[in-house]
Image: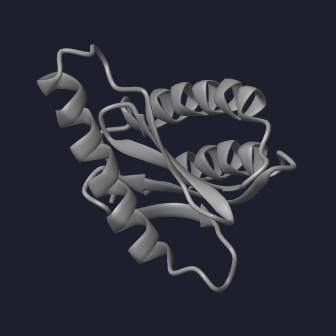
Amino acid sequence: MPSDLMARIQSVLGEIRRLPDVLGAEIARRDGIPIAHALPKTMDPKKIAAMSSAIVRTSEMAAVEMGMGGYTQSIVDSRTGKLMAAGAGQEAILVLMLRNEANMGLILLSVDKAVQSIAGILDTAEVIA
C-alpha cells in the first residue's frame, strides 16, 4: 500500500484509538488480512482480522436473509469486554476491542465517522495489498 494511503489509514486508526473506552483497534481487508492495527501486544492481528472478517461476512448475510436492510455493525459481548466489527466500504472492516462499560453512544458516533473515512480512502485507492 502506498505510504500516503497508509499514513491516512493510520491517522483514522489513531483517532479511534484515542477514545477512552477503546482497548485496541484494527483495520483489515474484507478477506481477513490486516491492514493496520493498534492492538495490545497480547493480541495477534492476523487472528483478530480473520475472525472479525468472518463475523462481518456472516452478519451481512444474516441481515440480508432476514430482510433487515443494510448491515452496519456487529457487537460481541463477553464477560470482560466487547468486540465491535463494522464494514468500512467495499474493501475493509474496522474492528474495536472495547471496555465492558464502554459509552456505546460515543463509540457508535465515532465508528460511523471512521468507517466513512476508511471507505473514502480505500474504496477509491484501487490498491490494498
Which residue is at 53% across, 25% downward?
116
* Quarter of the image where the N terminus is located: bottom left
Residue 119 image point, x, y percent: 45, 31
Drawn side of residue 83 relative to residue 56, left or right: right
Residue 121 image point, x, y percent: 49, 34
Q: Which residue lies furthest to the front in this view?
A: 79
- Which one is nearer the viewer's eye here, 84 or 90? 84
Splitting the image into 4 quarters, where does residue 68 fall? top left
Residue 4 image point, x, y percent: 58, 48
Q: Which residue lies furthest to the bottom in this view?
A: 42
Splitting the image into 4 quarters, where does residue 109 fall? top right
- Against 48, residue 67 (above or below) is above
Which residue is at 39% across, 57% downward?
52
Could one spot residue 104 in this view of the protein?
Answer: yes
- Which one is nearer the viewer's eye here, 24 or 37? 24
- Against 81, residue 11 (above or below) is above
Drawn side of residue 76 relative to residue 89, left or right: right
* Quarter of the image where the C terminus is located: bottom left
